[in-house]
Image: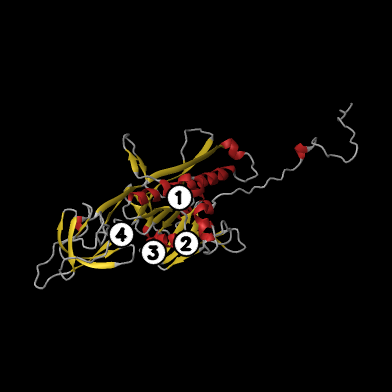
Amino acid sequence: MNMPTPNIGVIAGTPNTGLENSAVMIRDVDPMLYFFELDKHPIASMVLSDGMNLQYRDGSVVPQITGKPLKKRARKNYKVEHLEDQVNLADYYKPTAAVTAAATSLTVSSTDDDHFRAGDVLLLTNASGQTERTIIASVAANTLNITDTDGGTRTAGIVMTTGDKFFRMENARAEDSTAPVIRTTKRAEIYNYLEIISETYGLTKTRRAVSDYNGDPYLLEKRKAFSRLMTQLEQMFWFGTRDVASSTSNPVYHSGGWKYWVETYSDVEIRDMAGFSLTKAELMSFLGSVARGGSTRKVLVGGMRGLTPIYNMGFEHVQVPSFKIGEFGVQIDRVRTANGIFDLVYEPLFDEIDVMSGSLCVVDFDKLQFNYLAGNGVNLDIHDETQLLADGALADKGQYVGQVGFTFETLKTMGWLKNIGA
């Protein structure tokens, strides 16, 4: 019996240098993939790590949970409400017309004249640094009739423009006088919705059974889905708009985020630097204004166009990213002011979305809360769940899902410095 003759060729020189045997060579595939990039999702990282910061120990590739928790709360309704009040009617006022040295009245807006009453002492100021105390003799529509504090006619006071401020002081009463009328604040309802967000993943059973250099291919898909969910949550925090699409039988709820509330709120410090250079004095003025209330330890979040000027001003070095040091997955350095400390955090999302390019955003985590819907044995905090498929389906599917949202107890302790370098 004759044996088959192999197709043996002659190799001149070093054998097996070509591609003829490549099919039997062992492949060297690096299984490393990058997930949970905490430096790219600083806010979402705090939420999805149970409200804690992830920090790397020196010489370790495994993050350690440290730091102060982000407040987290289960809610009983998809509409989260609170009533907000404040002590004073306003922090300051501005006249709507210029004030001369001999003026006997101040004109104010129609929304502000109800704040005042006879006997209120006013502190007038101007850009020259001058101050003057006057007293309100009577209040009319849009008008505060004023005198010197001794009751005499005002003849040699300070001069004010519409850009200058005046402040309401105490109410001075005469001996044996009746009580002045009441001027106080009233509560307003503030509410936000909890939004249903999800990210699905899946594989056919055939693909799950095929060996993969990255290990379990189904776990790989889960990790990728989780990373996409982190991006969604980060974007929802910054750019979510409170709304509800109720024209269908199944409403779609939208949770308002930081930008929505900052622009909606009336007493937030927002400064537009378009066409202006950001000086150290302007930066400190902005931070000093925001830091007057709330936590003495706030977070200053920015893109590279916002953070770079801080480094150039000689503050502490800003380094991003660092895998060893720093909460939020980056090294956080600080700007110290007389009213508090600001931790610097790099937000890559700001460099990707033009409207936030050149922004520095102050976030006060003491006034911020992450909420999820839970009740009657059902918990809709962000979780992983398996999807039930039709009988006999040769596939496995799942999803990360939750009905969640953020609430801001107050926005007065936050602020936005935008269009830096524009």
What residue is shown with label 3? 295
Q: Residue at x 33, y 57 (%)?
A: 410
The mark that comes first in sequence, 3 or 4, is: 4
Query: What's the residue type where badge 2 is placed?
Result: Lys
Query: What's the residue type where badge 1 is placed?
Result: Gly
Return the residue found at the far top: 1
Q: How far separated are the C-alphas under marks 3 and 4? A: 29 Å
Q: Identify whether 24 is placed above or below 320.
A: above
Residue 404 screen position, x and y as percent: 39, 48
Query: What's the residue type where badge 3 is placed?
Result: Ser
Q: How far separated are the C-alphas under marks 2 and 1? A: 16 Å
Of 378 and 41, nearer the camera is 41
1 or 3: mark nearer the eye: 1
What residue is shown with label 4? 164
Hey, which quadrant is residue 150 in on the image? bottom left
What residue is shown with label 1? 275
- SS state under label 1: loop
